[in-house]
Image (cartoon, rainbow, N blue to C red):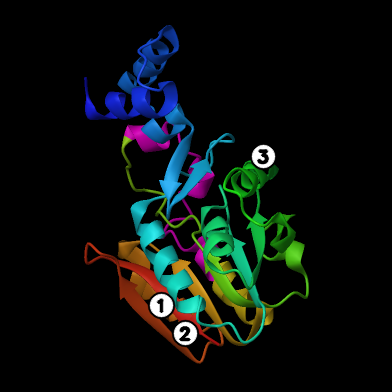
């Protein structure tokens, strides 16, 4: 039995090779991502459900979400306002709820289909729903005059002409992957509006692609931030811009 099949039968079927497992094994053979077949993806100790088939949370996002929450947990002098922008499954915001007990977390997501998935991830992980709320709409549109201490965003950032593996493009939402010719359409808009939604001393954590990381850094430096820096992921790739306001 292949590694993914073994994980599937153990996690979804309690080790029993039943008819439903055989059907799911065929889904894997066709190239469907394991996380969709199982129905969830681990993320910083949480079980992130994928019922509405949002983008599957990646290890590189898990890496910087851990760094972000580790930094932010020390900011306990006042309640922390946190926005998970382009939330998808809500993995980043759920990690903030789990690890930052003083944070009030807003989830911003364009696709209304993902709202129930975010709510399920809050509920099924035993998180404090009283500290969470969801805004459905285009980027900052649901938040009007709100300001935040932390804005965390994993927006679409892949250049439109890039060829990705079929098990990504055939199954994951293209709208959560591609963002214009250079992959920066959404990042431009986030950087243009971030300052108007940021509290004094706030931070913007923005995932980007290695191919456009330097341009993303330039956009962040034009956003009104006092300082912006580019960070590399555990594989040495430029993948994160952090701006301080």
Q: Identify the element where label 2 is drawn.
A: helix
| Mark-to-mark CA distance, 3 and 2 | 34 Å
Label pair 1/3, CB-CB below 8 angstroms? no
Span of residues in magenta: 166-188
Identify which residue, 85 or 193, lies in the foreground. Answer: 85
Q: Identify the element where label 3 is drawn.
A: helix
Give the percent coordinates (x, y) of residue 126: 61, 49
Read off the residue under disc 1: 217
Q: Residue furthest top?
A: 19
Label pair 2/1, CB-CB below 8 angstroms? yes
| Mark-to-mark CA distance, 2 and 1 | 6 Å
Q: Is residue 205 magenta?
A: no
Q: Quadrant of the C terminus?
A: bottom right
* Label 2: few (<14), some (14–19) or many (≥20) C-alpha neighbours in 10 Å: some
Read off the residue under disc 2: 221
Q: In the rendering, which numbered label is found on residue 29?
A: none
The answer to whether 93 appears left or right of 18 in the picture is right
Q: Is residue 140 above or below residue 194?
A: above
Read off the residue under disc 3: 113
Q: Residue at x 32, y 43 (%)?
A: 163
* Label 1: few (<14), some (14–19) or many (≥20) C-alpha neighbours in 10 Å: many
Q: Is residue 135 above or below residue 72?
A: above
Q: Identify the element where label 1 is drawn.
A: helix
Label pair 3/2, CB-CB below 8 angstroms? no
Q: Is residue 216 visible?
A: no
């Amino acid at each position: 039995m292949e590694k993914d099949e073994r994980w599937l039968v153990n996690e979804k079927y309690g080790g029993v090779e039943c008819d439903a497992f055989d059907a799911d094994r065929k889904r894997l053979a066709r190239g469907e991502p394991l996380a969709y077949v199982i129905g969830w993806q681990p993320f910083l100790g949480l079980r992130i459900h994928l019922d509405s088939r949002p983008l599957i949370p990646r290890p590189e996002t898990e890496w910087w979400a851990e760094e972000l929450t580790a930094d932010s947990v020390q900011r306990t002098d006042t309640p922390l306002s946190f926005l998970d922008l382009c939330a998808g499954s809500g993995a980043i915001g759920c990690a903030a709820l789990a690890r930052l007990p003083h944070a009030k977390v807003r989830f911003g997501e364009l696709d209304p289909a993902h709202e129930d998935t975010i709510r399920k991830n809050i509920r099924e992980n035993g998180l404090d729903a009283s500290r969470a709320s969801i805004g459905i709409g285009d980027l900052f549109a649901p938040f009007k005059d709100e300001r935040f201490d932390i804005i965390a965003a994993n927006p679409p950032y892949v250049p439109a002409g890039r060829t990705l593996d079929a098990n990504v493009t055939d199954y994951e939402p293209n709208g959560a992957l591609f963002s214009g010719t250079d992959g920066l359409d959404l990042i431009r808009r986030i950087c243009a509006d971030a300052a108007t939604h940021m509290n004094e001393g706030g931070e913007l954590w923005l995932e980007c692609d290695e191919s456009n990381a330097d341009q993303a850094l330039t956009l962040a430096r034009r956003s009104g931030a006092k300082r912006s820096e580019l960070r590399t992921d555990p594989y040495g790739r430029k993948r994160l811009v952090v701006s301080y306001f």
